[in-house]
Image (tube, rainbow, N blue to C red):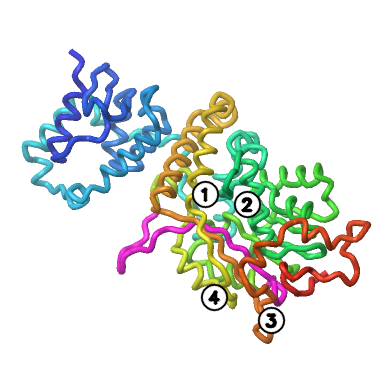
Amino acid sequence: MARIATQLVGALEELLGARLPLRVQAWDGSAAGPPDAPLVVLRNRRALRRLVWQPGELGLARAYVSGDLDLAPDADLYDVLTAVARFSERPDLQDLRFGLRDAVGPKGRRLAAAALRAGALGPQPTPPPEEARPAEGRLHSRGRDRAAISHHYDVGNDFYALVLGSSMVYSCAYWEPGAKSLEGAQEAKLDLICRKLGLRPGMRLLDVGCGWGSLVIHAARHYGVSAVGVSISAEQVALARERVSEAGLSGRVEIRLQDYREIQDGPFDAISSVGMAEHVGTSQYLTYAAGLYQLLTPGGRLLNHQIARRPSCPGEPYVTSPFIERYVFPDGELSPVGSTVSLLEQAGFEVRDVESLREHYGLTLREWVSNLEANWTEAVRSVGRGRARVWRLYMAACALAFEENRIGVNQVLAVRTGTAGDSGLPATRRQWLGAGRDAALGDLGPGGEPAAGVPGGTDLGDRPTVR
């Protein structure tokens, strides 16, 4: 008689003292759990063994990535993740502790017996090949950072094109009222950054962690700047160079395979860092901030776009997600936005503006998940089923995390003030946000060069360029 799920779910609920948030179907066809809950499927005994050896997030991730655990065809991934998150956050379960007495007591023995009958007790299964190997070298050394970046970004530009769409922008879009497409919202984000930086023709822009070159191409094409983009992902750099050439901007945009700590050819009028600082690490953040400060000319602006976590309680250590650490961003670290602002100020910057785009990232991630699901067959052909499942799981989980305010993302605008303390920014936020590409390109001469004697325009601030 098919009954594995009934025995396992019954014993586990008895031990926890609570109903599971999911309905479970086992490989023998049995199912148990709330009939109205999302259905998950245990494909084989190995799924149970993964959960026995690594209870919690990492075990679930390994089981899902490997395909040992799956969703029913009509189950919604967001519903499953929401149910699991709310269940794990219940106060009565967070305070639950299991000791030796619980393990050898009647409830523990019944669960062990059910697991034994189901074949869940056995050698630990090998982790899926998509899991990052243990890191080597000193944390955030240049070599270790290159390996961590390669794990995430060097998986195939064709795969990223399926997920990100034609914009090839891997950071949250800016969803203005009436936004009709992901591509339009990404262009709006690129333009927002250029306006915050006060770009105009003749300026020199540095984009740290330039991805596939979308921002530097946009800034050169629409704001007349010359730009340098740096990345330590070989595959990103290769495609970014192709895109710059195809755009006819090779004379004004340079893409480098280079670590931010190796840049020596300042000054720059403006620096953008979008979705890169999460890889820097707490131990290196002041070095990062001070280095960017030194690369800016006085009056130059920094736009730092960075994911943030909620502050920890006093004395509570920061613990990274084991799934994110092993499968998505090895050595990645998130900091509260207040800590980021403080470190930028310690490096010498004056922080002028902080804007939260948290809800924008939730919308963006849902678009990326939709793109992946719509192109699933091609994505699996490109990177394999396991890696495609990693990206689907992580992007859906992150969408919920942004929507529920468990993480956020902020654009911090900072300036290296002049020797007399002048910032070069207009008096009001409306002024420097009101200027756009038309105002910037109005300064171009007939040959595409900055017209002699033409000021930058009051909305962009009044400061000389380094050119």
Q: Position of residue 238 (x, y in %)?
A: 72, 44
Q: Which residue is mark 2?
A: 189
Q: Amino acid at mark 3?
A: Gly
Q: Amino acid at mark 1?
A: His
Q: Which residue is mark 1?
A: 360
Residue 70, visible in the rendered structure: yes
Query: Closer to the camera, 366 or 134?
Result: 366
Residue contact at pointers 1 and 3, CB within 8 angstroms = no
The magenta span reads 294-320
Residue contact at pointers 2 and 1, CB within 8 angstroms = yes
Q: Which residue is mark 3?
A: 418
**Tag 4 or tag 3, which sits nearer the N-term?**
4
Give the left or right position of residue 59, taking residue 21 as reference.
right
In terms of secondary structure, where does tag 2 sit? helix
Residue contact at pointers 3 and 4, CB within 8 angstroms = no
Q: Amino acid at mark 2?
A: Lys
**Residue at the image point whose x is 67% and y is 62% from the top:** 434
Give the left or right position of residue 212, taking residue 101 as reference.
right
Q: Amino acid at mark 4?
A: Glu
Q: Which residue is mark 4?
A: 345
**Residue at the image point whose x is 76% and y is 46% from the top:** 241
Nearer to us: label 1 or label 3: 1
Position of 249 relative to 165 (above/below): below
In terms of secondary structure, where does tag 4 sit? helix
Between marks 1 and 3, how big is the CA–CA gap?
34 Å
Q: In the figure, residue 456 lies in which quadrant?
A: bottom right
**Mark 2, residues whose alpha carbon is within 10 Å: few (<14), some, or many (≥20)?**
many
Residue contact at pointers 4 and 2, CB within 8 angstroms = no
